[in-house]
Image (cartoon, grey):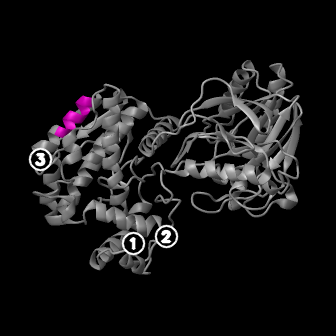
Amino acid sequence: MPNVRLALAQTNPTVGAIQANLAQILEQVVLAKQVGADILVFGEMALTGYPIEDLASRESFILEAELAVKALASKVVELGYEDLAVVIGHPAMANVQEQTGWAIAKNCASVIRGGEVIGTYAKHHLPNYSVFDEYRNFVPGNELLTFEHKGLKFSTVICEDIWQEGGPVSKLADAKTDVALILNGSPFEIDKDDKRLSLVKNLVQRQDCAAAYVNLVGGQDDLVFDGDSIVIDSKGRLIARAKQFKSDLVFIDIAAKDDMAVVGEHHLTKPNDNWQAWNALVLGLRDYIQKNGFKSVVLGLSGGIDSAVCATIAADAIGPENVFGVSMPSRYSSTGSKDDAEDLASRRGINYRIQAIENLVSPFESALDLTGLPAENLQARVRGVILMALSNKEGHLTLTTGNKSELAVGYSTIYGDSVGGYAPLKDVEKSLVWELAKWRNDYARSRNEVEPIPVSSIEKPPSAELRPDQVDQDSLPPYDVLDAILESYINQRKSRADLVLLGFDQAIIEKVLTLVDRAEWKRRQGAIGPKITGMAFGRDRRLPITNKYKG
């Protein structure tokens, strides 16, 4: 009876770092073989990182990736692993007659065995929605790749191919596939893991085969790949599940498509949504910092909930010793807010300093005769200047602390509190910010650790403190109402008429939607941040700045 030990390598590549990614792959080859692997499968574009965007149109880049595939094949033999089959994701040049416009390459999975590439599969369905633009970058394939190993038949497909009807994936049963090897670069979204699981279960039932779904892990600009690779047998039973938000190497013994067993200790349950969201934000920030050569971050600490959550995410990501918080009180800053900022820094052990802004604001106010809103915005811009000056002087990455709700309605000062290179809360609405803060404190308490976020930062009414007794609700609806409207208008693409039918007040609808539409120009200039929902600002939602449509 066949008995194949299949290994799933859940790796964290860096886009463009082909040689470093190759070294990472070879490390997994050695580790997998030490545990007796017969087949080792990596994620989509594990060799180059993903997505490669318009790097796919650079011939030199694609040729270097092809040379790396050959180097991998040679190195596996040099290590004495001729009998190990390695399935690796990478780009490859398309035939000249297939190339069109920008597209000169294919998104591929190659099977390496005995020092040779014994077959290459090209992704058939090229996603052209949400964050994906692969129709621009790649030439589609149209053939299934099936190979036999130790008496079992394995077929390779890539990510989107299992999300769409037709194409090579529809041929799995005809090819008498025992196990479908699915290479993925599937970004994290809250609840997406359940969709993936259901999708793969439907696939195995339709095609009468088992499936090994191998995902990337790690942050890449505004995307976070959560791993969560899974193996499902032909009866639809979940056999194995890799870690979320961490590199992992999982082993499965396969006697037949309906006879599979995970090797070693393993847990099939998934964490709750708040744990997943928090860890996605932490991983996205950590990898953006490290992959772009930063060592530390600086951010303003106002004593409010947003800056408290951002600082805590940063401390979890890179260690509190590498987080530099700056309190920048004005004449309007309350004693409570200043105390809360210091309390947060003390609880988490981050670096803390105070830089009052009054002596910097006053000369501008006097020289330009500023009052009202211009004077309020001036305070935020002076704070932005301070943070960017410290960034330049000390080499920190500046974090901007605005949340999705504020970004949606433009409740921020351009070149002020919006300055920074990365926005950890860009895809986190205000209601979820509070929820995550409470969850993080509960998590700390469950581990007998100090709760990092002061309770007063969570409970007090949010305020920019740019004028006496100011609170956010002077300018905005209550956040529970605002977030409900934003969910319908932005995430669900509902119209004004739809929102009225849902029961929202018509005057509030008009105010909120007008603010959202007017703020597009601000969002275009904002920092990127980790995507955790199905409709993040940026690559997900693309609307013209000049836009008079009121539907």
CB atoms of marks 2 and 1 within 8 Å: yes
Q: Mark 3 points at which residue?
A: 334
Give me the residue at 86% from left, 57% from top.
96
Q: Is residue 57 visible?
A: no
Dot placed on the residue nearer the N-terminal end, 3 or 2: 3
Q: Mark 2 points at which residue?
A: 543
Give me the residue at 88% from left, 40% from top.
147
Q: Can residue 496 be seen in this view?
A: yes
Q: In this view, does 287 lie above or below 105?
A: above
Give residue 272's quadrant in the image: top left
Residue nearest the viewer, comparing 148 with 549: 148
Residue nearest the viewer, comparing 361 with 185: 185
State the quadrant of the C terminus: bottom left
Q: Is residue 481 magenta?
A: no
Dot placed on the residue nearer the N-terminal end, 2 or 1: 1
Q: Residue 82: percent from the left, percent from the top?
A: 86, 24
CB atoms of marks 3 and 2 within 8 Å: no
Q: Mark 1 points at which residue?
A: 517
Q: Is residue 90 above or below residue 203?
A: above
Residue nearest the viewer, comparing 31 with 51: 31
* Direction from residue 302 to residue 92 in the image, left or right: right
Give residue 464's quadrant in the image: bottom left
